[in-house]
Image: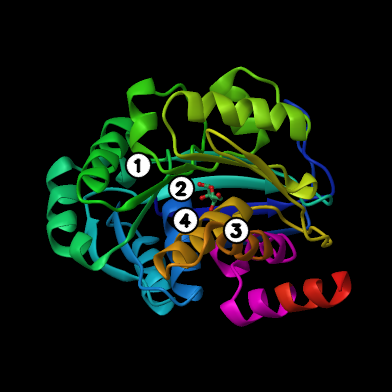
């Protein structure tokens, strides 16, 4: 459950300073949104994905729903609401780093009634709820409560980070912030494995099952109430980091839905995130499962 957007992305050597105009090198218009990207990652990972969201009635809507359908995502619970679809305005520089302004638009029209109907219909077929923070927080909370009640594993990607109600953490099985989001949510500045572990403990002390903090080339830290484990990153050349976190969350959820153990689910998620940064764009950069498996095998071969 989450956002669907049209991603309008410019590529330029560097990002402009405030008030400056610069010439860019390329532009793309593709399907994105953290919710849609995660649903597509689930489908590419080979698990059924049921999307719950809204698009508008503008020119972008068919691109968005068609992209989800082509990727194999069920869109029976994606509503069309009058007005514009969600938009993300993304800028990417030559180092592959980005900045994003996301405007929810149609995504703000999701309702409790739509979520309830989707749960009635699809929760009996599901094992995991994946959600993020690009739709109204009241609705994210509503879905998390419902998912917890019916026994789904709840994975919350707290992006974009904003202050959240502490009552939510006991209902979250795995929270997956990157280092910036973890710093913003906990007030602990995450710069390395030790500070990531401290931030992770902030979440588990408030009731989250696990905190899984991603730190790009520094890997990921998994924190539970009683343990801390580091997962090293897979070295790749980054051309565009957009949607790496979504690939991570989607592959994590898909693996857990197939009953994989948490450590192997995290390895698959790390490989999916690594492959995503080697391609431009949001949904078009999400990898197929075969590529993820190949990368994991080549890693094992290098280590042994
Ligand atoms: O996580 C990447 C996504 O965040 C992009 O596709 C963009 O839509 C923004 O919402």
Q: What residue does disc 4 label? A: 6
- Cβ of mark 1 under 8 A from ligand 1: no
Residue 181 lies in the magenta-colored region = no
Element on which disc 4 rests: strand
Comparing marks 2 and 3, which lies closer to the viewer? 3
Relative to 165, is 117 above or below? below
Comparing marks 3 and 4, which lies closer to the viewer? 3
Residue at horizontal 65%, vertical 25%? Answer: 198
Q: Closer to the N terminus: mark 1 or mark 3?
A: 1
| Magenta residues (range) | 272-295
Element on which disc 1 rests: helix
Q: Closer to the N terminus: mark 3 or mark 4?
A: 4
Q: What residue does disc 2 label? A: 87
Marks 2,4: beta carbons within 8 A? yes
Q: Closer to the N terminus: mark 1 or mark 2?
A: 2
Task: Estimate the spatial distance between the alpha carbons at disc 4 and disc 1, rounded to whole Å.
Answer: 11 Å
Q: What residue does disc 1 label? A: 105
Q: What residue does disc 3 label? A: 263
Main SS of residues in magenta? helix
Marks 1,2: beta carbons within 8 A? yes
How far from the left and from the top, in percent, is residue 9?
62, 53
Element on which disc 2 rests: strand
Task: Estimate the spatial distance between the alpha carbons at disc 1 and disc 3, rounded to whole Å.
Answer: 37 Å
Element on which disc 3 rests: helix
């Amino acid at each position: 459950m989450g956002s669907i957007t049209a991603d309008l992305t410019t590529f330029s050597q560097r990002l402009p300073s405030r008030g400056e105009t610069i010439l860019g090198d390329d532009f793309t218009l593709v399907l994105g949104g953290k919710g849609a990207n995660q649903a597509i990652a689930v489908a590419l990972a080979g698990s059924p994905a049921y999307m719950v969201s809204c698009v508008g009635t503008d020119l972008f809507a068919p691109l968005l729903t068609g992209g989800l359908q082509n990727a194999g995502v069920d869109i029976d619970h994606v509503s069309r609401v009058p007005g514009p679809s969600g938009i993300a305005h993304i800028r990417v520089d030559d180092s592959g780093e980005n900045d994003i302004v996301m405007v929810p638009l149609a995504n703000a029209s999701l309702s409790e009634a739509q979520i309830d109907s989707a749960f009635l219909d699809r929760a009996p077929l599901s094992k995991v709820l994946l959600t993020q923070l690009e739709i109204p927080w009241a609705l994210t909370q509503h879905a998390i409560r419902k998912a917890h009640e019916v026994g789904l594993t709840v994975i919350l990607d707290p992006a974009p980070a904003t202050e959240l109600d502490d009552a939510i953490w006991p209902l979250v099985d795995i929270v997956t912030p990157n280092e910036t989001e973890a710093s913003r949510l906990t007030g602990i500045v995450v710069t390395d494995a030790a500070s990531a572990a401290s931030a992770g403990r902030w979440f588990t002390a408030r009731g989250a099952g696990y905190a899984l903090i991603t730190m790009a080339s520094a890997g990921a830290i998994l924190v539970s109430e009683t343990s801390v484990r580091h997962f090293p990153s897979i070295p790749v050349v980054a051309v565009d980091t957009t949607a790496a976190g979504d690939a991570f969350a989607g592959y994590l959820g898909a693996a857990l839905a197939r009953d994989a153990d948490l450590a192997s689910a995290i390895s698959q998620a790390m490989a999916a995130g690594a492959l995503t940064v080697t391609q431009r764009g949001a949904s078009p950069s999400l990898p197929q499962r075969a590529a993820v498996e190949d990368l994991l095998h080549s890693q094992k071969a290098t280590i042994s």
